[in-house]
Structures are given as C-alpha cells and as structure tokens.
Image: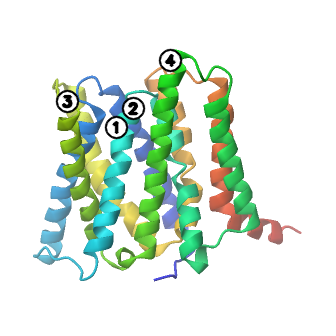
Amino acid sequence: MDERKPLDVLAVSAMMVLCLIWSLQQILLKATGAYMAPMLQLGVRSGVAAVLVMLLVLVRTRRLAFSPGAWKPGLLAGLLFAGEFLLVGESLRFTSAAHMVVFLYTAPVFAALGLHLLLPSERLALGQWLGIGLAVSGIAVTFLGPGAQTGDMKAMLLGDLLALGAGALWGLTTVVIRSTRLSAIPPSEALLYQLGSAFVLLVVAAFWLGQTQVQWTGALALSLLFQSVVVAFLSFLIWFWLLQRYQASRLGVFSFATPVFGVLLGAWLLSEAIEPRFLMGAALVLAGVILVSAYGWLCQLLRRRP
C-alpha cells in the first residue's frame, strides 16, 4: 500500500488537463452564483455525479458492492470532501474566483504534512520544510498586508480564510485516501463515498441556510452539466486513479498550474481585479507548493548537472 510509481508522461498530461478543468469550476460557480447559490450547485452536481458513478459500476460489474473494511475510512473521506466543498461554496460568496483557487490549492502542502507523519515513503526533506515556510509567508502577506482591515477587504479575507480551510480539508482527504484501506479499493468506490456524502451534506446545508433560490438560465444549465459530468464525475475519477498509482506529493507538483489558470481566467472572463499584495502572496504560496511537491525532481536535476 505504500509503494507508488514516479510520474510519467501519462500522469503529467492528465494532471495538466485536470488543472485546467478544476480552474474552470471556480469561474463557473462564481459566474452563475446569482442564479443558484454555489453551495446548492455543488450539492446538485455531487448527486448527479454519484448517480453516474453508480451507473458506471453497474455497467462494468453488473452489481453495486462495497469493499470489506472500507466504509469507515470512506465515510471519513466523504465528510472531509463534503466539508471542503461546503467551505468552497461559502467562500465564493465573499471572495473572487482567483483568490478562491489560489488558497484552495494549498492542499498539497497540507497533504504533504499529513503524509509525512504517516508514511515513511513521503517524509519531508529540509528543502520541503522551506517550501512550507514560503507558503505560510505568502498566506501571511495576503492576510496581514496593508489595507486588510477595510470593510470590503475584511469580507474578502473571510472568503480567503474559508478557501484556505477548504484547501486544508482537501489535503486531509488525500491523506485519508493514501493511508487507509481506500488506497486499495477501486477509484469509483472511493469517489462514490465522497460524492454521496457531499450531496447529502451540501443540499441539507443549502436548505438550512436558505440558499435554495434558483433562476434557470442557459448559462446555469450548461454550468451544472459541465460540473456534474466533467468535473465531479470524470476528473475526480481520474484524480483518484492517479492517487492509487503515483506518489501524492509528486502529483502535487503540477497542481500549481490550477491557481495560475484560475487567476488568469478570473481576470479575463470575470474582469476580476488582481491586487499587487495578492499577487505577491500568491507567488510565495505557489513557490512553496512547487518546492514541497517537486523537491525530489529538483534534487535529481541538480545532481545531473555537469
């Protein structure tokens, strides 16, 4: 359970496609939030994707069965996954899609810290601890910089904090998948635990918070279709498949592309302003994430230089 392959061309290509898809989901949620609350969108897409996963399993195996001993870690991963997207939905009410995607993708740092404690093959080196320090410094620059106490900025910082919490929960979900029975079960089963939990928790939370108003438009319908089929179904299946075959901390090396895509697409498609302080903090965060995730590669490259 502790052995994973180094990254190859297939893993790198898949991660780049996933990064583009995941950056688009924040843009779509923000753009259609006036028609349906992001939290309710996330709940609906999880339910649709869960049905698609069950149909896939039934077509392939003709039965819907769960692996022995997997339900407890599956439920834990599901609750963490649902909590992550609950925070994502709330975060987008206060902050921009660009801010959301940068702080959400601190997840590899949290995953690396958790795996360091649990798996000998994923111990952090000194350089990776430096990367964690850089990421923490970037977060501090964003949260503690000049102007952070103004009214509008306080609301945005609340959204940023919720996004950071979502990143932490995503990291913990990765730790649970990698360090428990879930690492050996089919990706479809691991995904089903999480989608089912997210559907129940997010829909209940949306009703509890009164975020159930819907104004159907073509843009909302297309957004839900993309999020349900491409994001929550196909991309998550690919992600869990990669987690079962490659080192989680190495996969994270390419996750830095998602916030880059997200910031650029947010500015282009949503006309979001990009503050200099945020750019400085985001650069430090991304540098830290890259150093944590790509440390092994960087050491190999340095040793190969004449």
Question: How packed is label 3: few (under 14 Cα within 10 Å), some, or many (20 or more)?
Answer: few
Residue that mark 4 sits on:
152
Closer to the chain start, of discs 4 and 1, is 1
Q: Mark 1 points at which residue?
A: 89
CA separation in Å, label 1 and label 3: 13 Å
For the point 59% across and 70% down, which residue is it?
116
Q: Position of residue 161 (x, y in %)?
A: 50, 38
Q: Residue furthest top?
A: 151
**Colour scheme of the rendered structure:** rainbow
Give the crowd class for mark 2: few <14, some 14-19, many >=20 residues within 10 Å.
Answer: many
- Single out the mark in the foreground, 1 or 3: 3
Mark 2 vs mark 3: in front: 3
Q: In this view, does 282 lie above or below 151?
A: below
**Three-letter code, disc 3:** Gly
Residue 252 picture location, percent across and down? 55, 59
Measured Cα–Cα span from mark 2 to mark 3: 16 Å
Q: Residue 210 carries which label?
A: 3
Residue named by callout 2: 92
Q: Which of marks 2 and 3 is nearer the N terminus?
A: 2
Badge 1 or badge 3: first in the primary sequence: 1
